[in-house]
Structure formats: C-alpha cells, structure tokens
Amino acid sequence: MTRQAISQSGQAAPQLDVQVEQQLDAPVEGRTSSQVYGVYTGYFECPTPATWTDHVHDTHELLWGARGVLTVEADGGLFAVPATLGLWIPAGVVHAVKSTQGTGFYCSHINARVAPQLESRTVAVTVPTAAQELLRHMSKFDMDDSIRKRSEQVVVGLLEVVDARPMLLPMPVDPRLERIARALLDDPALDRSLEEWSVEVAISVRNLSRLFHKETGMTFAQWRIHARMRVALGLLAAGYPVSTVSRRVGYNNPSAFVQVFRKVMGHTPGWYVSSLKAGNHQSLAGSE
C-alpha cells in the first residue's frame, strides 16, 4: 500500500518509515563490512498535526518515548501510545499513525531476522531505560559488527509484552458507525445522544445500538467513555492540567472526570502524570 504523510498545515509531515528504513539493510558509511543494521531508530518532531495514512512495511516497528498525542490504528483498533509504554507493530501489519501539534516520538525499525517471533499482532510493550539508551546509542554511533548484533538482541530481549487494553480502543468497521466514532475522537466533548446519531447516519436506534456492541464489544455509551479517556491520556502526557483535559473530553466537572478516568484506567490522572515524570514504564500495564 502507498504511504502518504500529510500535515494539517498542508506541509509534508516527517517521513515516518522511509527515513528510518533507508538506514536498515545498508552498510555503515565509511566501512567495508558487509554487515547491515538490524535495528535503527529515528526521532520525529511534529510541529503541526500530521497523519500517515494506511501503509505497511517489511520491518517490525516500535514506537516509543511519545511526547504529546500519538495514536495508531491497526488490527481493528485505535491505540493511544503513552510516554510510559511502546507499541510494537509487526512487519506486514497495515497501520495508520496520527499525531497532534507538538508531538515527538521515537521510531525504531527492527529487521525480522533480529526478532522473528516477538508477536504477530500489534501489542503494548515496556521499553525500559536500558533499552531506550541502547536504541539511541546504536542509531548515533558506529559499532563493531559483533557488538551491534549482540546489542540488537539485548534490546529486543528487554522488551516485555504487557496488557494493551488500556491503550486499545476497538474501532467499528460499519461505515455509519465509523463516521460516528471518528467524529467523537475528533471532538470527544460532543454530547449527542444515540437517538441524534441514529438520525444523522440514517439507522434505527435499535440497530445502531446492536451494531455498536457487536463490532466493539461495548455499548455506545461505554465506547464514548473509553474514547474520551484515550484522548485524555494524550492530553495529560502533553502537559495539560486536569481541569483543561476534563473540559476537552466533555466533563465540565473535573471531579467527575477523575472518577471516570480512575474507573477506566485503574488510577487517577494525577497518578498517571506523576508516573510519567518518574519514568514509570509500566504505569498503564495491567489496568482495567
């Protein structure tokens, strides 16, 4: 599939895959060795909102160290990528990436020969500090072939698959439901009732309710709450205060927002923000 990177300002967005993949399977400059990079990492800044439409590549992809709001659509769901965890996207999986203004993140491409069987689906993984530093080091400095090979294996060995449910929002595939879902993700404060949406997309309330549950495993009300909390994760990571985040996701009362956030995510927004600052790389792992 073709890849297109578009920013809302009309300017070209960073080349998420091409720029990094050019470093893979290419000899290190100035060396005569035939060895190639099995892992390469790039850092991307998005001064304007950007979208990378559906694409697929031959290497595994690890997105990590996100600052701001970074979301990935893959394997039938929308993943919010928090600063505390990474997202593993296996080679061959079609995915799209979206970032808001001011987002920054690392993108590591990993050759299948380095990690042939880590996971076959998109999953959340811990990226501990040791792995982060080693990924940065390998992208910046020349290394002996044998050391680089061992380092690549160490990095992959440090990644630990964790429960992705706190990051995952199932996406409906029916075009009418998808229209509703994307409208709510673009503006989570929208407070239209199920009846109002049913008129907008020309489907009965009963069928709309039934389809939402069938395709997402949630009622419409549950899905909207989870969508709001996924957007809230990114806003909190971007440094917005709880009062601002609560309004942006449809809660005029911050206390009500905190209560819902805790019920969905397993802890309070304040705990999550503190964990980000403390570098807790499992702050979302295993939440309900």
Image: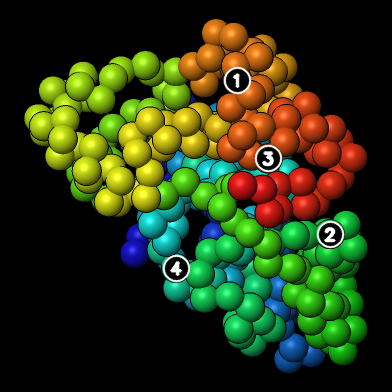
Q: Amino acid at mark 4?
A: Val
Q: How many angstroms separate mark 2 from mark 4 (CA)?
A: 24 Å
Tell me the element at label 2.
Answer: loop
Closer to us: 57 or 161: 161
Q: How many angstroms separate mark 1 from mark 2 (CA)?
A: 30 Å
What residue sits right under mark 4 in the picture? 93
2 or 4: mark nearer the eye: 2
Q: Please report the residue visible at 15 percent of the width from the left and 39 percent of the height from the top.
A: 207
Q: Residues within 10 Å of mark 3 (few under 14, many from 20)?
A: some
Q: Which mark is residue 257?
A: 1
Q: Earlier in the sequence, mark 1 or mark 3?
A: 1
Q: Please report the residue visible at 63 percent of the width from the left and 59 percent of the height from the top.
A: 163
Counting from the top left corner in percent of width and height, residue 8 is at 44, 29
Q: Are marks 1 and 3 in contact (CB under 8 Å)?
A: no
Q: How many angstroms separate mark 1 from mark 3 (CA)?
A: 13 Å
Q: Earlier in the sequence, mark 3 or mark 4?
A: 4
Q: Amino acid at mark 1?
A: Phe
What residue sits right under mark 3 in the picture? 266
